[in-house]
């Protein structure tokens, strides 16, 4: 599993968390400005980024207010 940090605005964190969880990506940690999301099927950071971008593209309004960063590979 690869974990990514998703930088968010406070008001978007719950919606983003639900979006990722809908696709089987657990929210490992949620703070006021970041979500740490696990991508269980990803074998590399590149795959996790691709998955995250795909899921975020399904909610264009949320994509504009979030940024992705790699945190850890587990």
Image (spheres, rainbow, N blue to C red):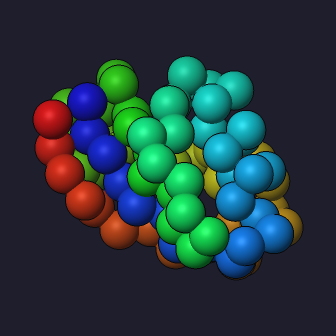
Left or right: 17, with 67 as reference point: right
Image coords of residue 36 (percent x, y) = 43, 52
Q: How many marks?
A: 0
Q: Position of residue 20 (x, y in %)?
A: 62, 38
Q: Is residue 40 above or below residue 19?
A: above
| Image-based side of 3 in relation to 22, left or right | left
The residue depicted at 25 percent of the width and 30 percent of the height is 1
Identify the residue at image location x=69%, y=26%: 22
Snapshot quadrant of residue 69? bottom left
Residue at 77% x, 64% y: name it: 12
Question: Where does residue 32 sit, x and y in percent of width and height?
Answer: 62, 70
Towards the viewer: 37 or 68: 37
Residue 26 visible at all = yes
Question: In the rendered image, which quarter contains the C terminus?
Answer: top left
Residue 55 drawn above or below residue 26: below
Quarter occupied by residue 9? bottom right
Q: Where 17 sits versus 4, above or below?
A: above
Asked whether 43 or 73 is in front, the reply is: 73
């Amino acid at each position: 599993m690869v974990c990514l940090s998703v930088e968010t605005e406070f008001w978007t964190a719950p919606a983003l968390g639900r979006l990722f969880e809908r696709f089987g990506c657990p929210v490992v940690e949620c703070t006021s400005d970041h979500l740490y999301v696990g991508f269980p099927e990803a074998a590399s950071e590149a795959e996790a980024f691709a998955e995250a971008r795909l899921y975020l593209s399904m909610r264009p309004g949320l994509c504009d207010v979030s940024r992705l960063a790699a945190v850890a590979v587990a």
